[in-house]
Amino acid sequence: MLDDGRYLLFVDILGFSNMVESQSSDVVYETICKCLEPFDHWSKRNSQFKVIYFSDTFVFYQDSNGYGDWAFLDVYAIGGMILSSLLAKGIAARGAISFGEFVVRPDASRGRDLYYGNALIEAYKAEQAENWIGITILASAWKPFGEDRIALFEREGVWKRRDDVLFLNPFIRLLGWYDHAKLGEIEGPMEEWDVPEFPNDIAGFRFLHQKASEYAESNDFTSRIATKYHSTIHFLREVFDFRYDWACEVAKVK
C-alpha cells in the first residue's frame, strides 16, 4: 500500500458561485492565478507535486507513487501555503490531505486524462464533513510519518490533533517568526518581511478575524457560515497558544 499510494490534497473554495456571479470571468481567472502563485514558485524548485484545477476545486497530487517522509512534509506545506494565499485574497477554503490510491492516466489518443482513486474519495468526504475554514490531515496521510514526530510538530504549533485527525495551522510562517520578532531581529514593516508567505499569513489571519467579528457584531454565532469562522478562530487560539496575542498585534486585529 505505501509503495503504490500517493499523497493528495483536496481544496474546495467556499462561496465560489458568488464570486463567479459577482465578478467577470477575467477577474476570477486572475484571482485564482494569483492564489496559485506561491505553488508555481515552489514547483519551479520542486516538481514532485502536480495540480488539477476545475471550477471551485484544486487537487494537488504526488507525481510519483510511493510513501516518503519528504512527500508528507511537502504536501502539508503546500496545504498551508495555498490556504494562506487564498485567505490573503479574502477567499475562504476548506480541504483535506490523504494518502492512498490515486490513478493518473493520460490518454492523448482520446484527448482526455483520467484521475480517480480512493485517496480522492477519502479527501473529498473528509473535507465535506468539517465545519470550519482549514485543512485536515487524515490518518492515512500522517500515520506513516510516526506518532512521535507528529506529537513533536504539534508542540511546535504546526497542527492540533483531535482523535485521528490533524487540523493544520495554515499560518506556519507567521508562527515561525515569533521568536525572531521578540528578539528584535525583524527590521521594517512586518508586512514587507519574507515576501510573499509572511505577508499572506498576516493578511489571511486578519481576514478570518475580521469576518468572525462581523458575524459577532451581528450577534450571529449559529448560522451555517458564521460557525465556520467562529470555530476557526477558536482553533487559532488553541494552536497559537501563548503566541496568539502577538499574532493579533501583528495582524492589527482585536
Image (cartoon, helix red, strand yellow):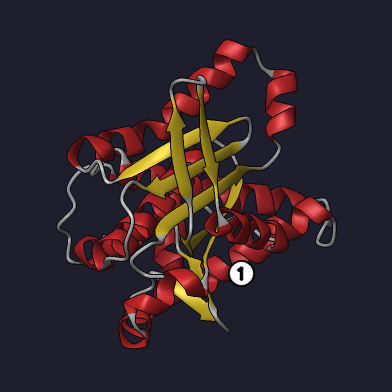
Tell me if I can see residue 217 in this picture. Answer: no
**x and y percent of residue 86 in the render?**
50, 40
* Of residues 229 and 13, the one drawn nearer to the viewer in this rendering: 13
Q: Please name the residue that numbered disc 1 is placed on.
A: 234
Instruction: Tell me: residue 21, above or below residue 202.
Output: above
* Of residues 191 and 150, the one drawn nearer to the viewer in this rendering: 150
**x and y percent of residue 37 in the render?**
36, 31
* Of residues 243 and 184, the one drawn nearer to the viewer in this rendering: 243
The residue sitting at the left extreme is: 185
Query: Which residue shows up at 44% across the image and 45% down it?
Result: 60
Residue 174 image-quadrant placement:
bottom left
Query: Which residue shows up at 48% across the image and 52% down it?
Result: 102
**x and y percent of residue 125 in the render?**
67, 59
- Which SS class for mark 1? helix
Kind of residue indicated by mark 1? His
Residue 173 image-quadrant placement:
bottom left
Q: Give left or right: position of 191 versus 166.
A: left
Label 1 environment density (alpha carbons within 10 Å; few <14, some 14–19, many ≥20):
few
Query: Which residue shows up at 52% across the image and 41% down it?
Result: 115
